[in-house]
Amino acid sequence: MARFLMGEYDVIVVGAGHAGCEAALASARMGKKTLILSINLEAVAMMACNPSIGGTGKGHLVREIDALGGEMGINIDKTFIQSKMLNTAKGPAVHSLRAQADKNRYHEEMKKTLEEQENLDLKQGEVVDLIIEDGKACGVVLKTNSVYRSKAVILATGTFLKGKIFIGESVFDSGPNGLAPSVELGDNLRKYGLPMRRFKTGTPARALGKSLDYTKMTEQPGDEKIVPFSFLNDDLKKNQISCWLTYTNEETHTVIRKNFHRSALFGGQIEGVGPRYCPSIEDKVNRFADKKRHQLFIEPEGLTTDEMYIQGMSSSLPEDVQEQFYKTIPGLENLKIVRPAYAIEYDCIDPLDLKLNLENRSIENLFCAGQFNGSSGYEEAAAQGLMAGINAVLKIDKKNPFILDRSEAYIGVLIDDLVTKGTNEPYRIMTSRAEYRLVLRQDNADLRLTERSYGLGLASKSRYERFLQKKKIVELEKDRLTKKMVSPEEINPLLEELGSTPVKNKISLMELMKRPQVTYESLKKIDDSRPELSDHARAQLEVQIKYEGYISKQEQQIKRFKKLEDKKLDSSFDYDKVDGLRIEARQKLNQFKPISLGQASRISGVSPADINVLLIHLEKMRRKKS
Amino acid sequence: MARFLMGEYDVIVVGAGHAGCEAALASARMGKKTLILSINLEAVAMMACNPSIGGTGKGHLVREIDALGGEMGINIDKTFIQSKMLNTAKGPAVHSLRAQADKNRYHEEMKKTLEEQENLDLKQGEVVDLIIEDGKACGVVLKTNSVYRSKAVILATGTFLKGKIFIGESVFDSGPNGLAPSVELGDNLRKYGLPMRRFKTGTPARALGKSLDYTKMTEQPGDEKIVPFSFLNDDLKKNQISCWLTYTNEETHTVIRKNFHRSALFGGQIEGVGPRYCPSIEDKVNRFADKKRHQLFIEPEGLTTDEMYIQGMSSSLPEDVQEQFYKTIPGLENLKIVRPAYAIEYDCIDPLDLKLNLENRSIENLFCAGQFNGSSGYEEAAAQGLMAGINAVLKIDKKNPFILDRSEAYIGVLIDDLVTKGTNEPYRIMTSRAEYRLVLRQDNADLRLTERSYGLGLASKSRYERFLQKKKIVELEKDRLTKKMVSPEEINPLLEELGSTPVKNKISLMELMKRPQVTYESLKKIDDSRPELSDHARAQLEVQIKYEGYISKQEQQIKRFKKLEDKKLDSSFDYDKVDGLRIEARQKLNQFKPISLGQASRISGVSPADINVLLIHLEKMRRKKS
Ligand SMILES: Cc1cc2nc3c(=O)[nH]c(=O)nc-3n(C[C@H](O)[C@H](O)[C@H](O)COP(=O)(O)OP(=O)(O)OC[C@H]3O[C@@H](n4cnc5c(N)ncnc54)[C@H](O)[C@@H]3O)c2cc1C
Ligand SMILES: Cc1cc2nc3c(=O)[nH]c(=O)nc-3n(C[C@H](O)[C@H](O)[C@H](O)COP(=O)(O)OP(=O)(O)OC[C@H]3O[C@@H](n4cnc5c(N)ncnc54)[C@H](O)[C@@H]3O)c2cc1C
């Protein structure tokens, strides 16, 4: 069968999931002629699992994606049906935004955004092979024999690559949600020697809302005051839909235990490795045998459907067992399952085979993103997609890669974890993975990242100006609060009211705000000359002032961290020439070619002693040169 | 692998396309516990091809479906984005309503209707086998080993059964639109000895709207006054979207001709038989070699997408050829294809294997509907689905089947054509197929059918009352018009204005209305006591009066037709005992067991002479009995 050339692009993105969409939009917005392909256009930004965006750690990623000029935050702001800031009882480092999405609207809006984007072509088509010349990716081949050539290719194939579904003893080839899998491409990637592996993930059943009894569950309404995901949005008003909380019980667990033998998971048919952090319900019952109950949330999938998502209850048990155990749960006694739970196993790459710019180590100009890199989750996918898109463009333009380190962004933590430390299970972000989480807050993602993205030509001018404006306003206001003094007579009645110690001398509003009992809002009464601040600016101001001490301490730690990060290592560096390195470290370093001493220090098999040896060696070289 | 029982139903519907949805809703609305299954819930009422409902002949079917209490008319009224009454320059027999649908909304609304329907369960699942006991269908087996038992099964698998897609030289197993095909069920049906065949159909490319130049096309706006599809709707107001008309030219045809050799169609890889009436563009160029141009319409697929459907240009040529020939067309010079055109081949049953109630001849309680029966088109599918649903219920209840004859409805023509005459290509309805089309108008479908459907317990009370009301109003108004006389002085000025001959004596408004130049509306001036009529009623009134002569002539023909239809033949009738029948006729009749002499007369291989023999035989038997 003869292949024929259909077109030439700068960048081709394989896959239009959460990773692919961000990659393609970034590339097109940075001015590159871009093609995005999906086996099925219905899979554009499809939410194959939970109908929500954000959550602990994940919410941070979305904010960072937004600050950098990505689309996820804007898209969920358009299409959410409930919004909630999580963990508000804890410190600002772990405040995390989470929104329920109207699934179909989320897909439709993202697809429309792709359709409208300049420089971007969207096409339905299945990639079956790559075009590789001189070890460089330079195009793709479709099932229809069409060839598209390009300067860079981004792989973002999600859970479709050699997808295999498990429901009880029934096992069959399939992509997620009844869509066709991508078989040939997986085989070809193996042929090219890429280190492929099998990971797996699972999803719970969807039930019909009208079959549930909500009076037996606890209502989970949205926030009264909605905080938008995107820094471009100020005030969003929307009618919100509730979610519902309920729990498994001993009966549930008994049904599941009795049927362990019918699970593909324990039967050994699944070779893929599942995510420890999103275990199936049979996993939970197995691993936490003494736990009396597990919570689950009933979440609406959209406004135009009665399908409800049963969060926390994914499974690969047979359909009859599913029905049996779901029905033991308060409120679910009469549930009607619309789609059964299932597990899916798929091909992904070992991310150790990638560089920090998400380029493949063995095939040049081949970038990789999303679930394909061994991660899990829409937000993790989108973050990588965005970075892969940016870096593909920079590579084409022969510019330095855009790499965020662990002190700059959760995105930096995510990518560094994946490509430097590797992962043995589907990786998801967590706030605990970030060493500098007090600085990497969701509220300041724009202050951390927008300037850099604007420099890249990605963040738009208006986004940049909004950011400058906000930054300025916060600074001005901090300045004003520092300067504005109040007398004890003016302030003490209020302090008493707030349960805060009265003052004896004049004091600045700034000082007052540092007290835990005092908020910016509470000072309003005695501060009539204050300017009107946006919610974003006010949140920023408050955190900066209240946590100044902790933050500056963390900034000191970051300085120390940066010392090693700033010690750059050239990719031509020959570690065999360094005396005193242990053999394992030498091999790993030669294979990895870390970009800095910092990255080197995180490679498994490289010890602190090895880093010291390297430090001394670098110092010697520096002296020699000068 | 052990199967397990998941549930028991009265009726199980396999497939949630246009046929399956109507079948399941009818069954549930008639009080039967019903299950509807679809491989993929995204395929519920999916419009795999053109984004429109209705059109010549098809619009009639939708009106009849609606009159009977089906859903298609209601659903398109909710979701259309343009509405047009076609053929208004011709007589009322061929007036046909057609509406552009917002594809995604159409799917969503229908899915929601299924979700909300009492007695109906909707589930995602792939049927791989039937449960057949004692020659009777009594359940289905899913891929997951789940078994659902039932008293009747309805097959409505559309183009999914062993679906195979053709794009140029590339051939692969697939359902429509990148969805997974249904392979095992097709094999099992063959195993049960059902007479399966391969048919094929094709769809054009979808293009991005922003890549087209509409200034080079002719705008096709919707009607100013919208006529709803459903008799339940009076006045619909909506902003409408335009379609666009353009033409192929010699250059287009040259590109296509040059590439005939690269078409799967001419290469012989396609074994399936395609529809003569919806030919691919290469078919048209091949068959109508001297035609200088073919028209095509550019139609929007919805309000939330920029995808445009290129009506009239389906193809299975390779992607590069597609791009080349589409670009020769005025307005399409810079088109960007979002999804390529393709042909799909699939398993369907020879409808001669069905009875008039759509039940299979060899497997009892197995009903069949839609594309599976060898038809093509959403409306044809929906009409059969509705009838299969009704008849499955009647069968369970041991009641007489509900059969519409050729003089009662287009649905009757459709089903009689399929199961009595058979078809060698995907069958579509056309007004020319109806012998009594002046009576089978789209405007009077409610008058023809609602009463019968109400009798079945399907049409709702409110629908029935609306129908009675309309009927009464039309009768009353006809009566009033007959009685109301006007003098020459009163009427002649108006007649002059309308270009109609003046009168010399008093004349009734009824008489005046029979004149071609005079409309009901035009008489308003001199008829101030008239009641306020709904649009439906007014349309009805007008046609009944204006075409009275033709209609009553056709009613005479129908009486003659009914004579043979009313001569019922028992299914136990042994044609071997009838002397004088030719052998072929005898065989066919024994195999077919027609329900009436009328049906017998339409069986291929049964001649008018054979019918005469039968007539005489029946007469003899009647005399013997009495
Ligand atoms: C069953 C299931 C359970 C999940 N559970 C969880 C969970 O518990 N927690 C969690 O955070 N996340 C979960 N997810 C993960 C989440 O859905 C994915 O991580 C996320 O969608 C990944 O985004 P992506 O862009 O990498 O890939 P996807 O969203 O899967 O998109 C892949 C894209 O690639 C396209 N594609 C693939 N192959 C080809 C090809 N050869 N040619 C052209 N296009 C191709 C597809 O059409 C699609 O557009 C689950 C997903 C599934 C399916
Ligand atoms: C490429 C293409 C071109 C077409 N061109 C035309 C045209 O030119 N003119 C025209 O009038 N019509 C055309 N159509 C036809 C029109 O789409 C169909 O006739 C119509 O959709 C048939 O409706 P249906 O209900 O019979 O089947 P579909 O709408 O195909 O629905 C079939 C349903 O069955 C389900 N299903 C199948 N197998 C199983 C199983 N084993 N288990 C569970 N569920 C199953 C599917 O999931 C789906 O829900 C075309 C269709 C396609 C795909």
Image (cartoon, coloured by chain):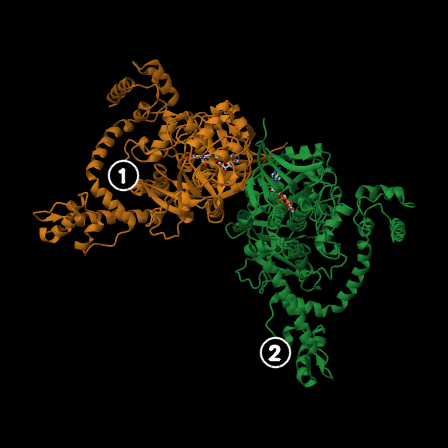
Chain colours: A orange, B green
Element assignment for label 1: loop
Find residue B594 and report its horizontal and vertical position in percent. Answer: 79, 47
Establish if B497 lies above or below A104: below
* Residue in the foreground of this view, choosing between B483 and A563: B483
Whether discs 1 and 2 lie on one chain: the answer is no
Q: Hey, which residue is sitting farthest right in the picture?
A: B580
Element assignment for label 2: loop
Q: Amino acid at mark 2?
A: Ser
Q: Which mark is residue B529?
A: 2
Quarter of the image for residue A558 reads top left
Find residue A97 and report its horizontal and vertical position in percent. Answer: 34, 42
Chain letter belonging to callout 1: A
Quadrant of ligand 2 in image: top right
- Alpha-carbon neighbours of circle 2 within 10 Å: few (<14), some, or many (≥20)? few
- Alpha-carbon neighbours of circle 1 within 10 Å: few (<14), some, or many (≥20)? few
The residue under the point 47% across, 23% down is A195
Q: CA distance from mark 1 to mark 2?
A: 76 Å
Establish if A92 lies above or below B62: above
Find residue A410 and report its horizontal and vertical position in percent. Answer: 33, 35
Tell me, yes or no, whether the two marked residues, 1 and 2, touch with CB atoms within 8 Å: no
Find residue B355 and report its horizontal and vertical position in percent. Answer: 74, 45
Q: Quadrant of the C terminus of chain A?
A: top left
Question: Would residue A20 appear left or right of B395 to someone viewing this image?
Answer: left
Read off the residue under disc 1: A90
Q: Quadrant of the N terminus of chain A?
A: top right
Q: Nearer the viewer, mark 1 or mark 2?
A: 2
Chain letter belonging to callout 2: B
